[in-house]
Image (tube, rainbow, N blue to C red):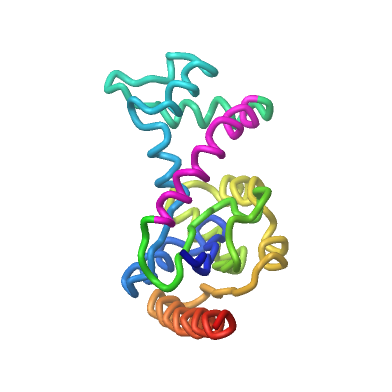
Amino acid sequence: MTRRLRIGLTGGIASGKSTVAQRFLELAVPVIDADASARRVVAPGTPGLARVLQTFGDHLLTAAGELDRGTLRRLVFADPTKRRDLEGILHPLIRADMELEVERSPGAYVVMAIPLLVEGGAKPVDRILVVDVPEALQIARVMARDGGTADEARAILAAQAPRATRLQAADDVLVNAGSVADLRHAVDGLHARYLRLVAGLAQNKE
């Protein structure tokens, strides 16, 4: 089977990635979500959950038999060594799960939604699509969503790749500084472009 075009969807917090992903789904484009894979690989009864508990302790298991993701997140956020240990367990499992989802998915191309795509190492995609938003607007959206302060929002932004770094890595950029309708319309334009790109790649192989 010919390897299909893979579009890596990423962007900072509150940039509009979910809206973009939803529009691709409405256009019948498969969206493989790294966050969904991250939840699946530590579901009850999985080897991933067993390894996390073995490394970090059974106290992370809730009464319902699920991973207490909030407690784990706070634990590793405060300790870079523990964060690397967790990434060493989860990242290979997440990559394998996403690859399986790609193989199962139909369509001319697939979108792989990976929030930390730019921050990570090897890129499992052919093109990087960045949803970009001016920082002031990004901070305002984080405050409105979470009910926090501007300083708290800036701290979240500081933990991610700088905006300039994401833009430098991008093959395509969607600027989300207008309405939701504007963003959805921009996705439609990109979808048409990607279909033309896929068609061109197919002709080159003939």
User: Which percent across, then down, holds residue 72?
Assistant: 49, 27
Answer with left or right where residue 124 lies relative to residue 41: right
Q: Residue at x 72, y 64 (%)?
A: 164
Q: Which residues are magenta?
A: 82-103
Residue 206 covered by magenta stretch: no
- Picture mark count: 0
User: Which percent across, then down, holds residue 46?
Assistant: 38, 28
Residue 9 vertical position relative to residue 188 in the rendered view, above or below = above
Residue 93 vertical position relative to residue 137 in the rendered view, above or below = above
Q: Residue at x 59, y 56 (%)?
A: 124
Q: Nearer the viewer, residue 103 or 159?
A: 103
Residue 92 covered by magenta stretch: yes
Residue 190 vertical position relative to residue 156 in the rendered view, above or below = below
Residue 42 vertical position relative to residue 30 in the rendered view, above or below = above
Name the outermost residue toward the front. Answer: 206
User: Which percent across, then down, holds residue 44?
Assistant: 33, 27
- Provide the major secondary structure of the magenta segment: helix
Q: Residue at x 52, y 74 (%)?
A: 177
Q: Nearer the viewer, residue 3 or 165?
A: 3
Q: Residue at x 52, y 63 (%)?
A: 9
Q: Nearer the viewer, residue 41 or 81?
A: 41
Q: Quadrant of the C terminus?
A: bottom right
Answer with left or right where residue 63 lies relative to residue 74: left
